[in-house]
């Protein structure tokens, strides 16, 4: 067992990337049988806390929309992220410690240049409709996202795939146009679960739960898959997700025992919730951040001095204290923090400097301009309050900000990427390259700041195939510097995930990639008294 754990923990940081890529990642095979990674028993857990089967688990989700769809390529809300991984599996998943571990792929290996990847698929797995899982389903899934007419949110993320072919029913070879050392990480993305070929309704997966009903923006119910292939997971008999977007209503439902878990507690009152009988607060440190993107191709934000003035006019430490109640860290206008392997310290932390901000806004000629900042608490808890505080901070620099309160419903469809200056938030991604590709790459669909920098794009692409760790880190440092100094991506805070559960809910170590244990609460958690 100790030997298996050491094998699984082996990463490119512990050996050269070149040697890492030359190997078949047989850690995948080891992880497939390691009980701690497959959820049988969290490391160090007491026997009394061991997972038990049974019960109807109800989750109160703080983000949902009537436009939600079972098509994972389009999902954005917490409701759909949870439901997605109830029903479906990826080829590879990320454990609570950030390691890549096998899911529908038992193992994978790459050529030395990271251009070709071979995945050995798990045998004996069935979709909920009884169809056997094979290489055809993997090909169907990847082709769906990368097709010419695809509208997938992650089309740009996998656009470098050249061909996908089956070598036999349980072996897939993926050939990339350019090498990508982080390609397995891409396949962990929540938008890329394996779809059942021929399932046009997107409801049949290989996951631990089978869909019974789904009302977009309202609720979903799923029952345990009796033939689930993954041992030690999917403990509940059934899972219900209720869309409760109002945080006070969500909190009251938890306190009253109407739901067993909620995401994103109201930090202003979390100290009171801690005192509630039968309630536990759970916290996970991860990669989630708040961002205030500005359209760099639209006046006045197309002026670099304006962008810098707005970055200097926000008091990050004050926001951390008031908005997050200390549950997080200050950001430095870059979406990567020290949790990521490729983060490189070296760019000085930006601090509140109203005098310099005043100078720059006057230099740009916008001292009389009123900057409209659009926000709703759908963006992140306290987003409107953060806007009001920002307005007060900026006023000391002679910068005028008007906070436009937007409706919570439809915020992600009608405001984010639509308004030139707004509040937003992102959960983490498996790799730095994935996050930057989705948020700052000039061709990215979710480039909410409309920032386009040829040098940044060049470095981002080159870093994917750079085998030398020192050179790769130098590339990420330059990318960080470019975004920090010139980008329209104001990132003031990284936030801890602060969720809450009823005290009879058991769980192991928590993942910080998304809310609620990396959005896998339904699969990983259990009732202690079931």
Image: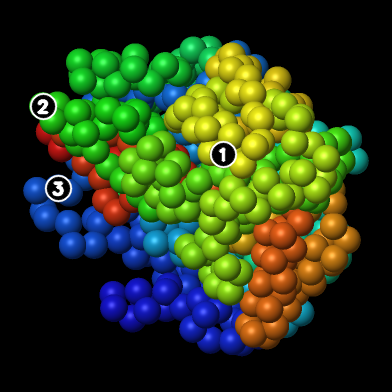
Left or right, residue 439 beside residue 273: right
Residues under numbered marks 3 and 2 in contact, where contact means CB atoms less than 8 Å apart: no
Left or right, residue 501 beside residue 194: left
Q: What numbered label is drawn on residue 214?
A: none
The one of 497 and 208 positioned closer to us in this rendering = 497
Residue under the image location 32 percent in, 30 percent down: 268
Q: Is residue 149 above or below residue 134?
A: above
Task: Assign the C terminus to one quadrant of the image.
Answer: top left
If you read the primary sequence from the N terminus, does the residue marked by circle 2 or circle 1 appear first? 2
Q: Residue 371 placed where, x, y %?
A: 71, 29
Residue for badge 2: 277
Q: Is residue 224 above or below residue 448?
A: above
Q: Is residue 151 above or below residue 185?
A: above
The one of 298 and 426 positioned closer to us in this rendering = 298
Residue for badge 1: 396
For mark 2, does the 10 Å Cα neighbourhood hold few (<14), some (14 to 19), or many (20 or more) residues?
A: few
Q: Is residue 392 visible?
A: yes
- Labels 2, 1: front one: 1
Of helix, strand and loop, which one carries label 2?
A: loop
- Labels 1, 3: front one: 1
Q: What is the C-alpha distance between the residues marked 1 and 3?
A: 53 Å
For mark 3, does the 10 Å Cα neighbourhood hold few (<14), some (14 to 19), or many (20 or more) residues?
A: some
């Amino acid at each position: 067992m100790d030997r298996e754990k050491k094998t699984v923990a082996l990463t490119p940081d512990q050996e050269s990337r070149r040697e890492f890529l030359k190997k078949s990642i047989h850690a995948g095979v080891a992880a497939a049988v390691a009980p701690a990674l497959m959820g049988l028993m969290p490391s160090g857990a007491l026997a009394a806390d061991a997972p038990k089967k049974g019960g109807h688990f109800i989750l109160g989700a703080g983000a949902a929309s009537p436009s939600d769809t079972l098509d994972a390529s389009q999902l954005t809300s917490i409701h759909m992220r949870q439901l997605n991984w109830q029903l479906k599996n990826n080829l590879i998943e990320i454990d609570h410690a950030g390691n890549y571990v096998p899911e529908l792929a038992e193992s994978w290996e790459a050529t030395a240049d990271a251009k070709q990847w071979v995945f050995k698929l798990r045998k004996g797995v069935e979709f909920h409709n009884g169809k056997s899982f094979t290489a055809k389903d993997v090909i169907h899934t990847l082709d769906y996202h990368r097709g010419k007419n695809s509208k997938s949110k992650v089309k740009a993320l996998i656009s470098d795939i050249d061909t996908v072919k089956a070598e036999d029913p349980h072996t897939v070879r993926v050939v990339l146009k350019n090498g990508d050392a982080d390609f397995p990480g891409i396949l962990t993305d929540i938008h890329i679960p394996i779809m059942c070929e021929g399932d046009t309704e997107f409801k049949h997966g290989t996951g631990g739960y089978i869909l019974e009903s789904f009302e977009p923006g309202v609720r979903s119910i799923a029952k345990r898959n009796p033939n689930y292939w993954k041992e030690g997971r999917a403990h509940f008999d059934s899972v219900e997700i209720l869309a409760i977007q109002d945080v006070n209503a969500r909190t009251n439902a938890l306190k009253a025992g109407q739901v067993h878990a909620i995401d994103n507690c109201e930090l202003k009152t979390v100290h009171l919730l801690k005192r509630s009988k039968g309630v536990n607060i759970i916290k996970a440190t991860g990669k989630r951040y708040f961002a205030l993107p500005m359209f760099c191709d639209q006046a006045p934000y197309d002026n670099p001095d304006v962008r810098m003035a707005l970055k200097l006019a926000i008091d990050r430490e004050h926001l951390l204290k008031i908005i997050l109640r200390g549950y997080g860290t200050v950001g430095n206008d870059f979406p990567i923090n020290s949790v990521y392997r490729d983060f490189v310290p070296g760019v000085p932390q930006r601090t509140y400097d109203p005098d310099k901000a005043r100078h720059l806004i006057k230099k740009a000629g916008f001292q009389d301009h009123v900057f409209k900042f659009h926000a709703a608490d759908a963006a992140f808890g306290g987003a409107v309050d953060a806007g009001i505080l920002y307005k007060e901070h900026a006023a000391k620099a002679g910068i005028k900000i008007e906070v436009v309160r937007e409706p919570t419903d439809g915020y992600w469809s009608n405001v984010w990427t639509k308004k030139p200056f707004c509040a937003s938030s992102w959960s983490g991604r498996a790799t730095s390259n994935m996050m930057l590709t989705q948020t700052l790459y000039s061709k990215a669909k979710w480039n909410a700041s409309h920032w386009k920098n040829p040098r940044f794009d060049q470095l981002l692409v080159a870093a994917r195939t750079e085998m030398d760790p020192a050179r790769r880190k130098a590339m990420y440092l330059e990318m960080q510097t470019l975004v920090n100094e010139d980008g329209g991506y104001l990132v003031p805070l990284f936030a801890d995930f602060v969720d809450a559960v009823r005290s009879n809910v058991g769980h192991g170590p928590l993942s910080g990639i998304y809310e609620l244990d990396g959005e896998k609460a339904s699969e990983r958690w259990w009732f202690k008294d079931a």
